[in-house]
């Protein structure tokens, strides 16, 4: 479960994410001293027996956090360098900060960026795409748990999905003869001027029809109606298909978050793509 804590000494949303053994910090008050805040986060992570701190930082504060032992893993730069655009990490255990899949993952990125891009074929007869409201929460939950043996968020709980939609997050689904066969989502964050494109999943027997790509295009169109957001995603670094989709859609590779979350049965590295 995710628990929010807001220490009086720091005006910052701090999420204790026990599911993924990490502390997630989506910014902090301007004027915060990186040296003090960094030490506070490390203390909190140790106290909660977490393994990683994931911190979004202002570019000007990065040197101060690096001196505390944090390291840079990616960014969302699009032109405004005053935003919380740098993704930093601190590893409580040195082992969790090391990935033995880097060569494989680097090769995937190289292949994704160098192979020619082909246009998708027309959607097969009998398939359709549409936006999903909270009445589809149970179907979304069932599909995500069917595709993934584990997931970074509690998608096995339909009420969690329903709450996401009720709070303004957008889900889109692909259907075959009225059966949900694919899903994707967009999580707009107006305060941080960004939107995560996420929760892409397609039932195995229906793959090969570019459903994630099509759903993401539909979601981007909906997000644009709500404002100008920095679009980004965290794609599994070992997934050629999903990295290929975001490259094809015009996202740029912005870094890799090591052992960032528990998905598909183990902790995995996640590639950061931004648009």
Image (spheres, helix red, strand yellow):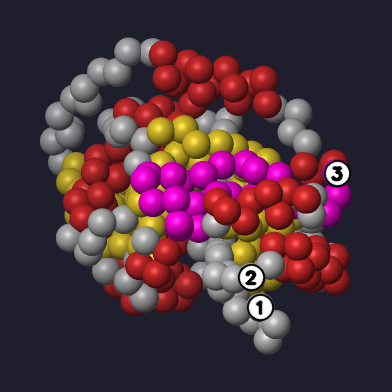
Res. 240 in view: yes
Q: Earlier in the sequence, mark 2 or mark 3?
A: 2
Percent x, y of residue 212: 33, 40
Disc with the residue nearer the chain's start (3 vs 1)? 1
Q: Residue at x 31, y 62 (%)?
A: 170
Residue lying at 37% horizontally and 61% vertically, measured from the top left:
193
For discs 3 and 1, the disc positioned in front in the rendered view:
1
Looking at the picture, tell me which residue is in the foreground, 15 or 69.
Answer: 69
Marks 2/3: CA–CA distance: 27 Å
Using residue 57 as the reference point, say whether residue 129 is left or right of it. Answer: left
In the shown orientation, is residue 168 left or right of residue 17?
A: left
Residue drawn at point x = 31 percent, y = 33 percent:
250
Q: Quadrant of residue 37?
A: bottom right
* Residue 249 on image: x %, y %: 30, 34
Q: Which mark is residue 32?
A: 2
Check contact, mark 3 vs mark 1: CB within 8 A. no
What residue would you read off at disc 1? 10
Residue ID for mark 3: 94
* Mark closer to the observer (2, 3): 2
Residue span colored magenta: 71-94
């Amino acid at each position: 479960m995710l628990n929010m804590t807001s220490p009086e000494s720091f005006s910052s949303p701090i999420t204790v994410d026990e599911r993924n053994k990490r502390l997630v910090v989506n910014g902090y008050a301007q004027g915060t001293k990186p040296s003090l805040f960094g030490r506070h986060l490390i203390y909190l992570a140790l106290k909660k027996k977490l393994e990683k701190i994931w911190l979004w930082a202002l570019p000007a504060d990065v040197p101060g956090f690096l001196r505390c032992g944090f390291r840079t893993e990616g960014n969302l730069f699009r032109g405004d360098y005053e935003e919380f655009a740098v993704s930093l990490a601190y590893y409580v255990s040195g082992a969790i900060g090391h990935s033995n899949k880097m060569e494989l993952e680097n090769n995937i990125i190289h292949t994704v960026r160098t192979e020619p891009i082909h246009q998708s074929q027309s959607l097969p007869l009998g398939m359709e795409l549409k936006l999903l409201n909270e009445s589809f929460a149970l179907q979304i939950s069932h599909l995500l748990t069917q595709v993934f043996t584990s997931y970074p968020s509690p998608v096995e709980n339909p009420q969690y999905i329903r709450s996401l939609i009720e709070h303004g997050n957008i889900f889109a689904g692909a259907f075959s003869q009225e059966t949900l066969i694919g899903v994707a989502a967009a999580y707009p964050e107006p305060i941080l001027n960004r939107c995560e494109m996420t929760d892409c999943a397609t039932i195995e027997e229906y793959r090969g029809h570019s459903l994630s790509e099509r759903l993401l295009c539909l979601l981007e169109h909906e997000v644009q109606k709500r404002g100008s957001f920095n679009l980004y995603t965290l794609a599994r670094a070992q997934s050629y298909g999903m990295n290929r989709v975001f490259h094809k859609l015009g996202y740029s590779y912005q870094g890799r978050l090591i052992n960032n979350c528990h998905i598909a049965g183990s902790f995995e590295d996640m590639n950061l793509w931004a648009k």
